[in-house]
Image: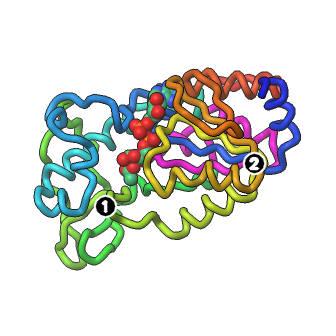
Amino acid sequence: MTISTLTQQLREAKHVVVFTGAGASAESGIPTFRDALTGLWERFDPAQLATAEAFRADPSLCWGWYEWRRQKVGQAQPNGAHVAITELANYVPKLTVVTQNVDDLHERAGSQDVIHLHGSLHTPRCIDCGLAYTLPLTSDALPEDGSRIEPPRCSACSGYVRSGVVWFGEMLPEDAWSAGLAAAEECDVFFSVGTSGIVYPAAELPLRALGNGATVVHINPVRFDISTQEHFLQGPASTMMQCLLREAFGGLPAL
Ligand code: OAD
C-alpha cells in the first residue's frame, strides 16, 4: 500500500487503534525488554525478574528492579511518538490507545483512557491480599546501576507490596483485555507501534483487527515478517507517527 492510500484510509477511518510496545518509549530513554541491560541487572533476563516466583524468592531484588524502572520513567519525558498519538485523537472520530507499556508516558503526553494491558509501575499492591498500596513511594534518587530495595509492607496484612505490572504466568487485567479486544475488532485502522509482537495474548490484537477487516500497519525500525495483508512502515515511532499525521491531516505536533 502506498503512503497516500494509507493516509486516505486514515482520513476516512471512524475508529483508529494505536497499539504500542516498548519501542514507543525507547526514544524517551526507556530500555526495551530485549535491550541488553547494565549494572546490577546485567546478569538477568527481564523475564526472570517478572514472575511471582522471582518476587517470592528474592523480594528485594525484584522490588529494586521495578523501583529502578519507575525511577527511569519518572526521569523520562514523552517523545514525539507519544505526542503525535495524542494529536491524532484530534483528527479522527475515535482513537483508542492500547499499550503493553507499564509507564505513564502516553498519559503525560495527554492521551486519555489509555488501556494498559500489562498493568502499570504506578499501581503497586499487596502480593498476599491484593490491597492497593497508596502511600507515596520513595522519590529518593536510586543508584544508576540499580540496587536491592526491601519492599514496603501492606497496612492490612503485612504482606509484601509488589509492582502493579502483569508478570509472566498471570492473566491480563480482565477489563483492559476485553476493552483492547473490542477496540481491535471494531476499528478500521490499527497501528502496531514499537512491539516485537511475540508476547501473547497482547500480540493477538493485530490479528483480531486484521480478521475483522481493519487495515493493519506495523511501525518499527527493524523489519520482521508479516502477512501479505498487513503493512509495514520502517522507521522510529516518533518519525513515522509524525509523518503520518502530517501527510494525512497536515498536523504538526508541537514538541
Ligand atoms: P520488546 O522489547 O519485545 O520489543 C520492542 C520493539 O521495539 C522491537 O521490535 C524493536 O525493534 C522496537 N523498537 C526499538 N526502538 C524503536 C523505536 N524508536 N520506534 C519504534 N520501535 C522501536 O517490547 P514489547 O514488544 O513491548 O510484558 O514487549 C512485549 C512485552 O514483553 C512487554 O509488555 C513485557 C515483555 O515481557 C510484560 O511485562 C508482561
Image quarter for ligand 1:
top left
How far across and how far down the image is residue 247, in percent?
A: 79, 22
Mark 2 residue element = loop
| Residue located at (84% from left, 29% from top) | 5
Amino acid at dot 2: Ala
Residue 101 visible: yes
How far across and how far down the image is residue 217, in percent?
A: 67, 36
| Residue located at (28% from left, 48% from top) | 47
| Residue located at (50% from left, 40% from top) | 105
Of the two numbered discs 1 and 2 in the rendering, the one whose residue sits closer to the viewer: 2
* Label 1 neighbour load within 10 Å: few <14, some 14-19, many 20+: few
Q: Which quarter of the rendered picture does the N terminus lie within?
A: top right
Mark 1 residue element = loop
Quarter-wise, where is residue 186 in the image?
bottom right
Q: Which one is in front, 82 or 182?
A: 182
On whether residue 4 falls in the magenta region, the answer is: no
Q: Is 60 displayed left or right of 21 in the figure?
A: left
Colour treatment of the image: rainbow
| Residue located at (36% from left, 65% from top) | 170
Q: Which mark is residue 135?
A: 1
Gap between marks 1 and 2 measured at Cα: 43 Å
Quarter-wise, where is residue 36 in the image?
top left
Q: Is 155 displayed left or right of 75 in the figure?
A: left
Q: Which mark is residue 102?
A: none
Q: Which residues are magenta?
A: 83-111
How far across and how far down the image is residue 37, in percent?
A: 25, 31
How far across and how far down the image is residue 23, in percent?
A: 48, 33
Q: Which one is in front, 197 or 178?
A: 197
Residue 79 visible: no
Q: Which mark is residue 214?
A: 2
